[in-house]
Image (tube, grey):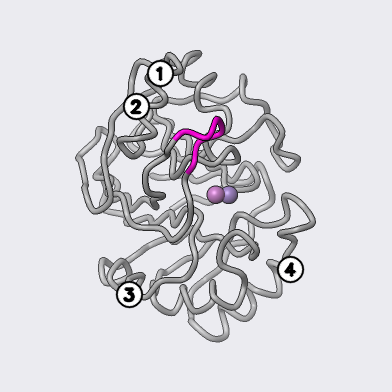
Amino acid sequence: MTKLTWYGHATLGLETGGKHILIDPFFSGNPSAPVSANSVQADYILVTHGHGDHVGDTVAIAKRTGATVISNFEICNWLNGQGVRNTHAQHLGGGFKHPFGYLKLTLALHGSALPDGSYGGNPAGFLLTTNDGKKIYLAGDTGLFGDMQLIGDEGLDLAVIPIGDNFTMGPEDALRAVKLLRPKVVIPIHYGTWGLIDQDATAWAARVKAESGADVFVLQPGKSFSL
Ligand code: NI
Ligand code: MN
């Protein structure tokens, strides 16, 4: 079984194959985070891109837990320089069979500079095939792009996509993304953290259900979805 927990903003916890995986662990300074960085478990940490609201507490959590951080090559190098020992670098289009499943980096239309201004390579999303065959797409911060059609061709059980607008897709483009991705279930993230990215996720969910047929789960921070 796989359980996905939303910790507000773009921070997610995934339990699958007996492993605890954190994605973009932004707890400190995240007004919507229901728990603190020093209370979460991690065997792996996945980082989509270099921005502060995604790298977040990666260094502190990796040092405390010994978790392996999976990200692009440039971010893994930077993390090594911050004293993070265990990293696994991949890059766009490349997949690897980890103990928790097969993880592929997908493209994302965004930026990726690190908090200290270092080059963060290209931003990414993640496509995970769990050990029991579930396909989960974590889009990361991105604008709409046509190759979401190709990602959708893989047959998605779940897509986790941003809807906040301003920095990423907003509701209109996120609806178009769902039509390209054709997932069974959608979970919206990267909204509501600050006024700049406030959205009515419930209204968006109703539109998506009516126009795409996908089920939408609007989570509250700290709540989980199991598949
Ligand atoms: Ni970003
Ligand atoms: Mn962001």
Q: Which residue is mark 4?
A: 200
Secondary structure type for disc 4 = loop
Image quarter in which the N terminus is found: top left
Could you say whether the residue bearing mark 2 is in a helix, strand or loop?
Answer: helix
**Left or right position of 213 against 33:** left
At label 3, counting other C-alpha atoms closer than 10 Å, the crowd grade (few under 14, some 14-19, many 20 or more) is some
- What label does residue 198 carry, if any? none
Q: Amino acid at mark 2?
A: Asn
Label 3, on which residue?
149
Instruction: Give, as a single range, the part of the protein colored magenta.
Output: 113-118
Sequence-first disc among 3 and 1: 1
Q: CA distance from mark 1 to mark 4?
A: 40 Å
Q: x and y percent of residue 17 in the render?
A: 33, 36
Q: Amino acid at mark 4?
A: Asp
For label 2, the residue is: 77
Q: Position of residue 6 (x, y in %)?
A: 59, 46
Nearer to us of marks 3 and 1 is 1
Dot in front, 1 or 4: 1
- Whether the residues at callouts 2 and 3 have beta carbons within 8 Å, the answer is no
Residue 117 drawn in magenta:
yes
| Number of disc labels | 4
